[in-house]
Image: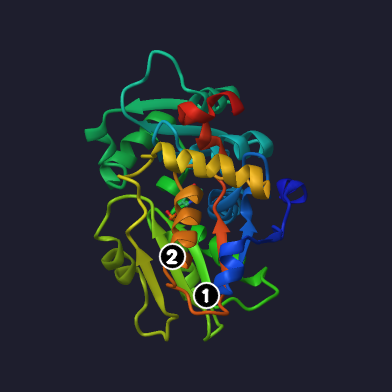
Amino acid sequence: MSILEKLNLPSPVTQIKNPLLDEKKIQLFIKRDELIHPVIQGNKWRKLKYNLLKANNKGKKTLLSFGGAYSNHLHALAAAGKELGFKTIGIIRGEAPRVLNPCLQDMMNWGMQLKFITRLEYKQKNNPEFIKNLKTEFSDFYLIPEGGNNTAGKKGCAELLDELEDHYDVICCEVGSGTMLSSLIHTNTDPDTRFLGFAVMKNTMLNEEINASLELSKTLSDWTINHEYHFGGFAKSTPELNDFIVDFKQTYNIQLEPVYSGKMLWGILDLVKYDYFKKGSKILAIHGGGLQGLRGFKQFKEKG
Ligand SMILES: *Cc1c(COP(=O)(O)O)cnc(C)c1O
């Protein structure tokens, strides 16, 4: 796949150093998946990879998927489609806005056909009858579920662990649907690594959902989802979180965003403060990318 040569893989790992981490004797590293590509990055590249390969192998010319009006997934898909010569169709949750936001504007500029449907209709996104109607409307396409959350998506996420050269006691990731986290739990072979997910929305069902997705017959790594740092819900932020993101960029030259990585890094450093991690722990935080999402927040608008 021609795109693979343009990607910065394996993504680099950067150590974060500050007085708090020194005092608590914690080593913190960030897996820089946001640097994989300016747009086709992070979590969403990992999930797209095998979907794109599969579509290509099946000789499909069109990719169709689902998402919200600020979807990192559809944004990456539109860019990948343009890069690889696929036609792309984005089915978007909610009425068409009078003015397209920058995310939708990019998608359209990259040739994605946008179809807006009501929130009620959107709930049908996995319903076979609904998909059949889409096939009638758009003829033949390769379907990628919302977020790239399918078996091919999990396979791509699993590759992240192969890229690690060192042992980490705790590996942290952002949790939306939990696809990344459950893929990591499944794939890990280091018995001394445990996984800590940070829920980015209020969803108390997450643990059960992830449990349901795991083959409990297998010996699995320890994992926990922390629900304390969603900042009020999905894509909700606060002035404090926004300031934290600005400071983080100034201090470490690493760009975070408020939907995912800002919440996780805030959470990790907060937990360090409260001695949640054992002294001497080596922690890896996976930056899931999604930096285009910054443009949805007033404070970051100019920086696009
Ligand atoms: C979609 C997304 C996630 C959520 O990942 P899940 O596998 O759904 O838990 C995390 N981080 C970023 C940057 C994302 O775009």
Q: For residue 139, which quarter of the picture?
A: top left
Q: Around disc 1, counting alpha carbons within 10 Å, would you say few (fewer than 14), some (14 to 19), or many (20 or more)?
A: some
**Residue 257 visible to an observer of this rendering:** no
Q: Is mark 1 within 8 Å of ligand 1?
A: no
**Which residue of the protein is positioned furthest toward the top in this rendering?**
98
Q: Quadrant of the C terminus?
A: top right
Give the alpha-carbon distance from disc 2 to disc 1, as whole Å: 26 Å
First reached walking from the N terminus: tag 2 or tag 1: 1
Disc number at residue 99? none
Q: Which residue is mark 2?
A: 271
Residue at the spot x=58%, y=23% of the render?
A: 302
Residue drawn at 36 percent across, 26 percent down: 116
Point out residue 276 in the picture as x, y percentages from the top left corner. 42, 72
Whole-percent x and y of residue 149? 43, 54
Q: Give whichever of 51, 131 is nearer the camera.
A: 51
The scheme the figure's colours follow is rainbow
Front label number (2 vs 1): 2
Judged left or right of residue 168, residue 64 is left
Q: Amino acid at mark 1?
A: Thr
Q: Secondary structure at mark 2?
A: helix
Residue 55: x and y in percent read 56, 49
Q: Is residue 66 above or below residue 186?
A: above
At mark 1, the secondary structure is helix
Q: Mark 1 highlights which residue?
A: 187
Q: Position of residue 26 (x, y in %)?
A: 57, 72
